[in-house]
Image: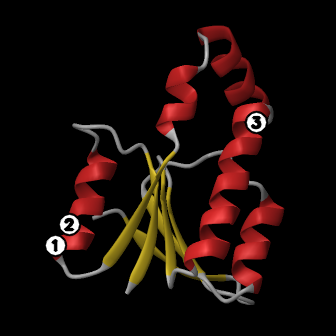
Amino acid sequence: MKVLFVGSLSVGQTSLMRMEILRELGHEVFPLSTQLYWDNAGFLTRRLQQAAGFGPIVERINSELLDAVMRLRPDVVWAEKQEFFKAEVLKDISSIGVTYALYPRSVFFIVMEADKAIKCVLAYL
């Protein structure tokens, strides 16, 4: 399976570890790290954009996500702890038939498919 893996992919991050496990399981994995954008921003800039849910970093994350999906045409977008995806970007991803799996900071794992509501909600393993 072709997977676009979106998350904080710095050394030592659990997202990076999960991405590597997908590779070990034989999936073709393409990384998209969003942590760099936040790390390169000043403290105040970062906090304001995270609190507001919009700004240049949020726009860049959404733009790069959509660009990567259009370029790579993955089977699945696996997004870990991504709080700043725009609804219209997720709808665009869904409209081209790509499944996306969102792994939020909470205790649920959500899998959504194109033209469907939530397919399943599983307890965190």
Taking the spot 64% from the left edge, 20% from the top edge, the residue there is 46
Q: Is residue 89 visible?
A: yes
Taking the spot 61% from the left edge, 12% from the top edge, the residue there is 42
Numbered badge on residue 21? 2
Percent of width and height locating residue 60: 71, 43
Percent of width and height locating residue 87: 79, 61
Q: In this view, does 113 lie to the left or right of 2?
A: right
Disc 3 versus disc 2: distance between alpha carbons? 30 Å
Disc 1 versus disc 3: distance between alpha carbons? 34 Å
Q: Is mark 2 on a helix, strand or loop?
A: helix
Q: Do the residues labelled 2 and 1 touch (CB within 8 Å)?
A: yes
Of residues 69 and 50, which is closer to you in this image?
A: 69
| Residue type, numbered disc 3 | Gly
Taking the spot 28% from the left edge, 40% from the top edge, the residue there is 13
| Residue type, numbered disc 2 | Ile
Q: In the rendered image, which residue does mark 3 sit on? A: 53
Q: Is residue 85 visible?
A: no
Q: Is residue 22 left or right of residue 45?
A: left
Taking the spot 27% from the left edge, 59% from the top edge, the residue there is 18
Q: In which quarter of the image is residue 99?
A: bottom right
Disc 2 versus disc 1: distance between alpha carbons? 5 Å
Locate the N terminus by quadrant: bottom left
In primary-sequence order, the first of circles 1 and 3 is 1
Percent of width and height locating residue 76: 50, 79
Percent of width and height locating residue 81: 49, 48
In primary-sequence order, the first of circles 3 and 2 is 2
Locate the C terminus by quadrant: bottom left
Closer mark to the observer between disc 1 and disc 3:
1
Relative to 94, say whether 82 is above or below. above
Q: In the rendered image, which residue does mark 1 sit on? A: 24
| Residue type, numbered disc 1 | Glu
